[in-house]
Amino acid sequence: MTNKVIAITGASSGIGEATARHLARSGAIVVLGARRVERLEKIVSEIKASGGEALAVKLDVTSREDMTTFIETTVNRFGRIDVLINNAGVMLIAPLAETKVDEWDRMIDVNIKGVLYGIAATLPVMQRQGSGHVINVSSVAGHRVGKGAAVYCGTKFAVRAISEGFRQEVGGTIRSTIISPGAVTTELPDHTTSPQVAEAMKAIYSTAIDADAIARAIGYAIEQPADVDVNEIFIRPTAQE
Ligand code: NDP
């Protein structure tokens, strides 16, 4: 892990933040991207105060230009990119009949197009380097459709499909990992605008686990020797169905 250069999208809270802190503690150089740059700056200064190396870059993953700048800034500053963690995501759960089309668009833009833009900006660099590792955060919802979650699940199924295609096409020297968490205590469910769903979500998240559990799983995948490709990790609360 020491001195690996790792770029993380959606690092201003939840799983991304926990992962940045965990990997920095393990010796990695971490580049944190998200829209709430003041939160990123605070995390970066705390990492640096503990002796780590980190950089904050303002990033909206729905912008190709931002994503290109994010990766270019990483490479210009640290000379390479060893790992990209496509973690940024939104979960706006509501029944299809509520036709919250703007929310469908947002989930597709962040959860699917954001991942693709990350791959587009990073893959040519990793191919030039002859090595690299792309980690995409999907979900248990990328394996199983729940009522009210059709579009969110659709985006997370797509993340797994893209990841598997990536593995088949560019494997060999570049590794790929899918991370599929169950309920994790983060801000993710707070953005739901459907009151009924928000209520149901409380029950699901009552046994949620800490984001550090996901950070440790991501660390495990990165730490393996170069010829070992951890393709997917499921991490669920023990009590989750
Ligand atoms: P949070 O809401 O805490 O974190 C989401 C992160 O994504 C934030 O840092 C946010 O930063 C960022 N983000 C959202 N939109 C954008 C955007 N347009 N551009 C850049 N960054 C963006 O939730 P989690 O930590 O839980 O979510 C992380 C990932 O984990 C997501 O992909 C989610 O689907 C997945 N996941 C989470 C589970 C859970 O139970 N928590 C379970 C399974 C999967 P900012 O707003 O500052 O831009």
Image (cartoon, rainbow, N blue to C red):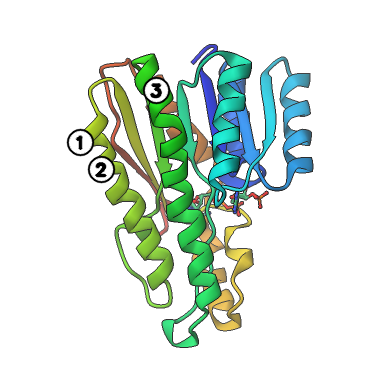
Label 3 crowd (10 A; few <14 / some 14-19 / many >=20): many
| Residues at discs 2 and 1 in contact (Cβ within 8 Å) | yes
Residue 115: where, in percent of width, then height?
44, 46
The Cα–Cα distance between marks 2 and 1, rounded to whole angstroms, is 6 Å
Compared to residue 179, the image places residue 52 above or below, namely above
Compared to residue 135, the image places residue 208 above or below, namely below
Q: Looking at the rendering, which quadrant does residue 223 occupy?
A: top left
Residue at label 2?
164
Q: Does residue 221 appear left or right of residue 114 in this picture? A: left
Looking at the picture, tell me which residue is in the foreground, 141 or 151. Answer: 151
Residue at label 1?
168
Label 1 crowd (10 A; few <14 / some 14-19 / many >=20): few
Q: Does residue 181 appear left or right of residue 49 in this picture? A: left
Q: Looking at the rendering, which quadrant does residue 234 occupy?
A: top left
Front position among marks 1 and 3 = 3
Q: Amino acid at mark 3?
A: Met
Task: Mark 3 or mark 2: name the one nearer the start of the chain.
Answer: 3
The Cα–Cα distance between marks 1 and 3, rounded to whole angstroms, is 16 Å
Residue at label 3?
126
Front position among marks 3 and 2 = 3
Outermost residue on the bottom side: it is 97
Residue 207: where, in percent of width, then height?
51, 58
The Cα–Cα distance between marks 3 and 2, rounded to whole angstroms, is 17 Å
Task: Mark 1 or mark 3: name the one nearer the start of the chain.
Answer: 3
Label 2 crowd (10 A; few <14 / some 14-19 / many >=20): some
